[in-house]
Image (tube, helix red, strand yellow):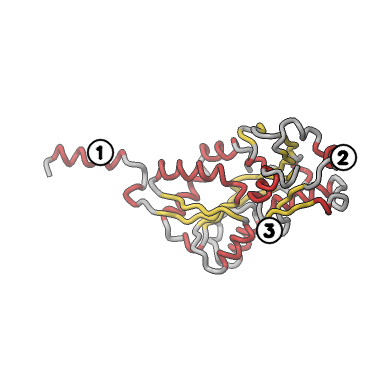
Amino acid sequence: MHPSRALRYALILLLLPFGSALAAQVQVAVASNFTAPMQEIAARFERDTGHQARLAFGASGKFYAQIRNGAPFEVLLSADDTTPQRLEQEAAAVRGSRFTYAVGRLVLWSPVSGWVEDGPAQLKAGDFRHLAVANPKTAPYGAAAVATLEQLGLAETLRGRLVQGENIAQTYQFVASGNAQLGFVALSQVAKDGEITTGSGWIVPTDYHTPIRQDVVLLSKGKDNPAAKALMDYLAQPQIRELIQSYGYGLE
């Protein structure tokens, strides 16, 4: 090869996205509340590293069962911190790899603009037929919603009006479609840069429920995948943490 041509080829390689010479795919299980930010993160991840993140969204409890039954996921972004910890303890995840990538915020939300102003007063007035919550047994946002109702002394009063979503995505659909007039959803589903962008809502104070710490963990199937390790590192980058915060999440 002519020296000048070889030099041009070397420069092209240097200008390619980092890691694209060894580009790989990573199978990622993502809690449904984190759908919008993770879609943006995945696009940036591929642009910046050359690796591709293949995303599946759902309830953390169901992902746990699938992972224990051999599902090919390599990274889990959970809606809680207990599921990743449990997978570590059961040798289904790499010990020491997990960290809190986001702290979730809960909001009482309606698609009707200006309707939800004083959340506790509205819940006590009972001017609605159905209140949507995620399944508290499998979805941390559902557990936080139930804890909020208990904090307000309304858990028993409103029990007969609750409609339960399998996960927070289905819970949001119940409210957005009008099948429930109100619902406890993730702030990230209805807000950007800390402001509710659609409908109206009451952001639940963080001391009304246990903090929704959302942990990511490298699963055993991904321990030798460079794309899985790269994604774990990428999620901890300052610019990605800023992006996560812009969707209404807190950070540790």
Specify few, some or many for label 3: CA neighbours under 10 Å numbering under 14, 14-19, or 20 or more: some
Q: Which residue is mark 3?
A: 138
Residue 125 marker: 2
Residue at point 68% right, 49% down? 171
Task: Please identify the residue farthest to the left as the structure is shown.
Answer: 2
Of badges 2 and 3, nearer the viewer stands 2
Q: Is residue 123 left or right of residue 250?
A: right
Q: Amino acid at mark 3?
A: Thr
Sequence-earlier tag: 2 or 3: 2
Specify few, some or many for label 2: CA neighbours under 10 Å numbering under 14, 14-19, or 20 or more: few
- Give the x, y percent position of residue 163: 75, 52
Q: Amino acid at mark 2?
A: Ala
State the SS at label 1. helix
Residue at point 45% right, 55% down? 26
Residue at point 72% right, 35% down? 112
Q: Are marks 2 and 3 in contact (CB under 8 Å)?
A: no
Q: Is residue 136 left or right of residue 24?
A: right
Of badges 1 and 3, nearer the viewer stands 3
